[in-house]
Amino acid sequence: MSTSFDTARRLILQHAPPLGVERVMLLAAPGRILAEEVAAPCDLPPYDVSAMDGYAVHAAGCQAGTSLKVTGFIPAGGRPSPVVTSGCAVKIMTGAPVPAGCDAVVPVEETEELSGVVRLLSAITPGQHIRLRGEDVARGDLVLSAGTLIRPPEISMLASLGRLTVPVYRRARVGIVSTGDELVEPGMALEPGQIVNSNAFSLAAAVLECGAEPVLLGIARDEWQSHKELFSAGLECDALITSAGVSTGDRDLVREVLEALGVEQQFWKIDMKPGGPTAFGVKGKVPVFSLPGNPVSTMVTFEELVRPALLRMMGHRRVIRPLLKGILQEDLRKGGGKVHFLRVQVRVEEGRYLVSTAGDQRTGTLRTMVQASALALIPQEATFLPAGSEVDFHLLSEDVLMLEPQNTPIPQPRAEACR
Ligand code: AMP
Ligand code: MG
């Protein structure tokens, strides 16, 4: 029996709960998900600080034309000077602590200094150009909630609060096993009947791209023992991905061996194209994805089914790419009964996404996968979509989106820079 795409993805996500938590150094945290909320142990800024280079003054009694005696100088990193009394000013640099007795900073551009006396050229408002202690973050404020993706701004906040380590969800270690007697590793001479094991590489790259850690376990040959050895090693990881050998061929052993190893099969066929012969099972906490062998099917099923599961295991909340809407540029016919994932090119024109097929959609055609910037989701029941119809798509990478007008041209390297 075949499972609908939505049911398959829901089942997979149900069996991929977040892994444990670990504490990592601050610079190992970008791209990870914060596992605990963070409250501020101190104020930010930690003291009243000057936001300009200028003169710290007591605003009351100052106006345009007032002259004040300059009694000190506070650079950034300097200590606050003694209390500044009325009729006096202190020269102060951006980032320096504002001394007691002052409640405004007059920018240097709005002053004239001569022989230790500064004349103010403009009106003064109390509080001007001072960032008050705790005005950004007050001690005890909840600044980051659990589940937050850690980006440079979060790193900046953690560093500012003095945190050197961060509790984050663990990265998933993902075992990858290719199956097939025809496979050889890249770079080896091909005998007739052999093909390169590209799936191990595309899967490892995809695993890395979503922030997980690939564990390349090699090629299982088309016999029981070889499958058993490599799959057993794979079941020691947080998740296992196998490629090929999962349909009904005479030598398709994947499902049988997994079952013998105690993997409970949840489904083994999905109403999707490419990717129909995809199986999914679980052993204990380890989800096992058995993907079809055609390189395009392997990548599409990883993208649509495995990636969301790995992201969820690593604590992400948004695990499915946003479904964007574009305008189909050509007529499209398909059989009913399956969701189709079309390799498409997307360009932006007048603020709308225009979607064209990337060409040959057969699963053996790798080139159109390379040329695709997105996967369009054509619903199960649809059989004909005329040009101009609205279609949903998952953008695979913003980098491959064709923008209009063109991005900044790539600068040509100077000759000497190449030497
Ligand atoms: P199978 O599911 O074993 O019948 O394989 C389906 C197709 O995928 C065949 O054409 C295989 O040669 C191809 N294939 C299987 N494994 C890989 C792999 N690791 N890398 C590239 N192509 C593969
Ligand atoms: Mg095979």
Image (cartoon, rainbow, N blue to C red):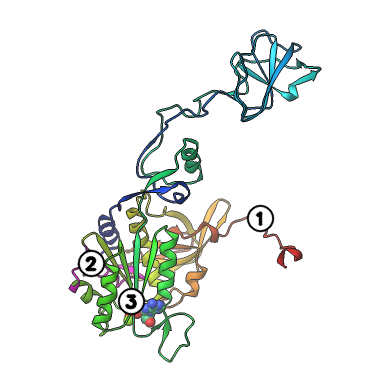
Q: Is mark 3 within 8 Å of ligand 1?
A: yes
The amino acid beneath tag 1 is: Thr
Residue 244: image tag: 3
Nearest the camera: 83 or 384? 83
| Residue type, label 3 | Ala
Who comes first in sequence, dot 3 or dot 2?
A: 3
Could you tell me how many numbered marks the image carries? 3
What residue range appears in magenta? 260-283
Q: Quadrant of residue 180?
A: bottom left
- Is residue 117 a member of the stretch shown in magenta? no
Which residue is labeled 1 in the image? 408
Q: Distance between the residues labelled 1 and 3?
A: 42 Å
Instruction: Identify the mark nearer the N-term, 1 or 2.
Output: 2
Question: Regarding ligand 2, which quadrant of the image does it lie in?
Answer: bottom left
Residue at the location (63% across, 19% down)? 81
Counting from the top left corner in percent of width and height, residue 339 is at 34, 65
Residue drawn at 43 percent across, 27 percent down: 139
Can residue 167 be seen here? Answer: yes
Q: Which callout, 1 or 3, points to the residue nearer the camera?
A: 3
| Residue labelled with disc 2 | 267
Callout 1: helix, strand or loop? Answer: loop
Q: Earlier in the sequence, mark 1 or mark 3?
A: 3
> What's the amino acid at mark 2?
Phe
Q: Nearer the viewer, residue 48 or 368?
A: 48
